[in-house]
Image: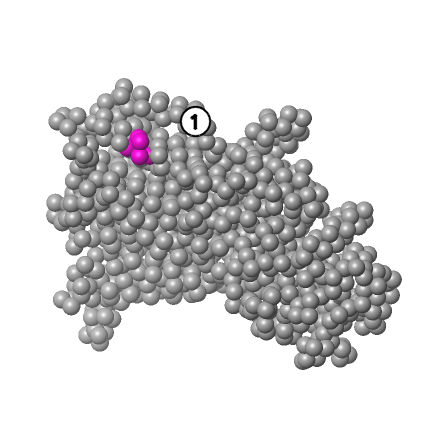
Amino acid sequence: MPADPAGRDPAPASVPTAPSRPALASAPGPAPSPLLATRGLSVRYGGVLANDDVCIDVGAGEIVGLIGPNGAGKTTFVDAVTGFASHTGTIELGGVRLDSVPAHRRRRLGLARTWQSGELFTDLTVAENLAVVVERAGLRGVFDDLVGRRRRGRRTRADPAIDPAIDQALDLVGLAASADRRPEELSLGQQKLVGVARALVGSARVLLLDEPAAGLDTEESAEFGRELRRIAVAGPGVLLIDHDMALVLEVCDRLYVMDFGRIIAAGTPYDVSRDEQVVAAYLGSPVTP
Amino acid sequence: MNDLLQFAVIGFSTGAVYAVLGASLVSLHIATGVVNFAQGSVALWAVWQTAALRANGTLVLPLGSVALGDGPMSAWPAVLVGATSGLVWSLAAHLLVFRPLRRAPALGQVVASVGVMLFIQALVTLRFDRDTMGVDPGGLVPLPVLTAQTFTFGGATIAVGNLLLAGLAVAAAAGLAAYFRFTRTGIATKAGAEDEQALRLMGYSPDRLAAVVWGATGFLSGLTVVLAAPAIGGLDPVSYMLYVVPALAVALVGRLSSIGVACAAGLVLGALQQILLFLSTKPWWPSWASAGVGDAIPFVVVVVALFLLGRGIPERGAREAGALPPVAVPQLRPLSAAAPLAATGIAIVLTSGQWRFSLVMSIVLTLVAASVVLLTGYLGQISLTTMAFAGAAGFALSKLTTNAHVPFPLSILLSALVATALGIVVGVPALRIRGAQLAVATIAAALAIESFVFNNPSLTPYTGNLIRDPSMLGHSLAVRQGTDVITLRFSFMVLVMVAVLLIALARLLSGATGRAFLAVRSNERAAAAAGVNVPAVKLLGFALASFLAGVGGCLIGYSRGQLSTASFTVLVGLTVLAATYAGGITRISGAVVAGLAGPLGVLYLFCTQTLELGKYYTLIVAAVMLLRVVVFRPDRALMPQGAARVRRLLAPFPSIARRHAPTAPAGPPADAVHEPESAHAG
């Protein structure tokens, strides 16, 4: 591998910030201090360095793409950021260090993810899948359950009042009508969208979406891209991992390209899609956004 | 020092049993992925078979018996036939139970092996009696086979037989390990556990390969225990079955994958127990810890081993737990709760004496089984400690009422809280381990509690652990009054208390707590990613379940007037789990079934009184449970397609559709794919 311009550089400042976005000039740019920032993030699985010194920023309202060939370490990065893989280096969310914070607490702080394989709760309905995020189980939850102080709008099977946040999230992904169905009754693409809705609900500040559009057809994928834009406009930053180049190039403000666990290129979709290294490692031929 | 050496060698006899059972468990796990709780029961049958042959030459079969000669058979042929009976049982378990279940979830496999364990044990007590053995089995001891020679080494007297046993254990383990490492079929067996399909394509039959391991481990386990039994002593119908617990502990030390480590750990554990037994006779040894030390060690070993090898959250690529029985979320409607309550109340009034007593026992057992529904059915944590929690609460109740004179309702609350604290401690291993391994840890905990607390003479006065009768506001709520063995007042007190707790449980399970439980059960990683504090939720589940079981234990205690340790043994705990699984472990109605069918409940009395089949009770429960697990599998939807169609048809009528949606069984599509594959099993 030739030396890469961005990933190996120890100075995080060299990671491109302020992207130019000719197509979507109206969308807000990344904040001066990004919402999510990783510095020198490395993950080692046995003898394999799955992530090597990864520095990625995601700003509020920004959609950032993370692309790369299979096995490049993209999912490992998401695992590390959300607390499912032990790592070195630092992770900050809104200036708060998350390195030693357990996974569930990272979610409550607003760092939400989806899974490549859906990973929905099969025993719960779609709405209940989202309710798990909104509710807090524990002694307090036991007390609430027992004495019936169910906060207004909470959805239970017996009492199908709808939490507005749950409905809103399901609406955003177009699945409000499926709220009472079981995940296994939905198509794979719809299950992925339930995963996105589950990540959205409950004040998520940064969404890490791991191949959310796999399983959608071209039309659905384009619709998903528009939904993603609407979501980002509302405030949260989005890190999007996907192999659907049309989607990625269409919706992302900036792109990072990962190969062999390292960031080999970063920049606007236009720049990245013309980067020789990226073309060689992943795209195969130049793509026009 | 000489003493220590001497006792260490004495410990090789039990150590050899642990080592061979442990090596067998590891081998079976390598070959099939099953953790076989029935390994000890198989050996138990072999010991009794050998004893029967040497008593009067009878080959005892599950039905009928064959005389293999006129009189007692000589030693070695009897040993060989006995060990072969272990082989046969092991093969039968493979063909009839585990092969059909090879893709079942861990819970199904654990419950099935517990069923086999209980089934063989119950059969041993039934079949080896005065009729088949010609003598009273109570007076028999296992006759020695190995040499009784001893020699002196460094001042210690060493029995040659014990060294031979250790040698046998090492040889057995070496043989099993060599099979997996050096033979083509052994390597193929290992591969088959990982990818059965690929192995079939290579022209091997995974079933036949597994059968080799099942047969070999059954034979070796039988042989070792038969040879070691005279040195260990005693011929009773339970003990060798429970040797599986320390054996599971050493198998876990070998991470369920190293036969050599399991064997070595078994020998060391046996030696260590004997040395501790010796040290506990010393004057400086604290008297409260002089009983049950040997049984407490396996639990410590398990916890340490599991903590070292377990993981907080399963990583990517961790083995899927498999489909679990679908859940029926309780929907509380006043009528559906009131009707059975009223019916039970009427039944209490109409019955008297023994029948009312067993009805009340059934009510209490429903509560205990409900704690299993919560912990195992909803939260997915396989716990075999339920009855030990109940017993611990009963124990605390005895101390609180007799020593501290704590008044009635408070006494139950405090005792149940003691059980809760214990439940949280036992739940700690669950933070890092799951599935069958958790079952191992919890059964070790149950055994430790049983022998360290319930059977510890220094904690129990000679008069037994008495419990003062309850009374409230000057009214006695005592269970007995004059000749009435169970009063109406007491019965209704139990009914009200259990009903209140069950309604509370239904509310919990249909609320946020139940959803969090189900989220953890279905996917721990996704639950953590959804903001659920998985460790806290697991401990909450253990706390709630042990509280419910604790209240149950207190009610059992009050109904007896003292703590009867026989009500809380590991065996009773396993029977309760079995009955709950058979009744439906994911619904409260399943707990009711378990209550009716459980030990000393209504069904038990019906068996003893009406059918005069009391001695068959455990056998019947085990058989029904095995049928339920293997044939009418609860993890498998009966007709998922049909249910979906019904729901589609009902779609225009949302109110009906919604009512049907949560209860309609719907298996995951992946399960349906396997349907034709294992259909021949059912």
Residue A218 is covered by the magenta coloring: no
Which three-letter amino acid code belongs to the residue tagged 1?
A: Pro
Q: Position of residue B631 (x, y in %)?
A: 51, 34
Name which residue lies at 47% across and 45% down. Answer: B513
Tell me the quarter of the image containing the C terminus of chain B: top right
Rendered image quadrant of residue B262 = bottom left
- Residue B663 can be seen in this image: yes
- Residue B373 can be seen in this image: no
The answer for which chain carries disc 1 is B
Tell me the quarter of the image containing the N terminus of chain B: bottom left
User: B136 or B543: nearer the eye?
Assistant: B543
Q: Secondary structure at mark 1?
A: helix
Name which residue lies at 74% across and 58% down. Answer: A242
Figure colour scheme: one colour
User: A85 or B11: nearer the eye?
Assistant: A85
Residue B314 is left or right of residue B568, and the answer is right
Within 10 Å of disc 1 (Cα), the crowding (few <14, some 14-19, many 20+) is few
Q: Which residues are magenta?
A: B494-498
Outermost residue on the top side: it is: B350
Q: Position of residue B402 (x, y in %)?
A: 15, 45
User: B23 or B628: nearer the eye?
Assistant: B628
Q: Position of residue B428 (x, y in %)?
A: 39, 57
Which residue is disc 1 drawn over?
Answer: B334
Residue B529 is left or right of residue A144, and the answer is right
Name which residue lies at 62% across and 58% down. Answer: A205
Name which residue lies at 23% across and 30% down. Answer: B490
Check the image and report above or below for B228 versus B394.
below
Majority secondary structure in the magenta region? helix
Residue B297 is left or right of residue B638, and the answer is left
Q: Position of residue B169 (x, y in %)?
A: 37, 61
Q: How many marks?
A: 1
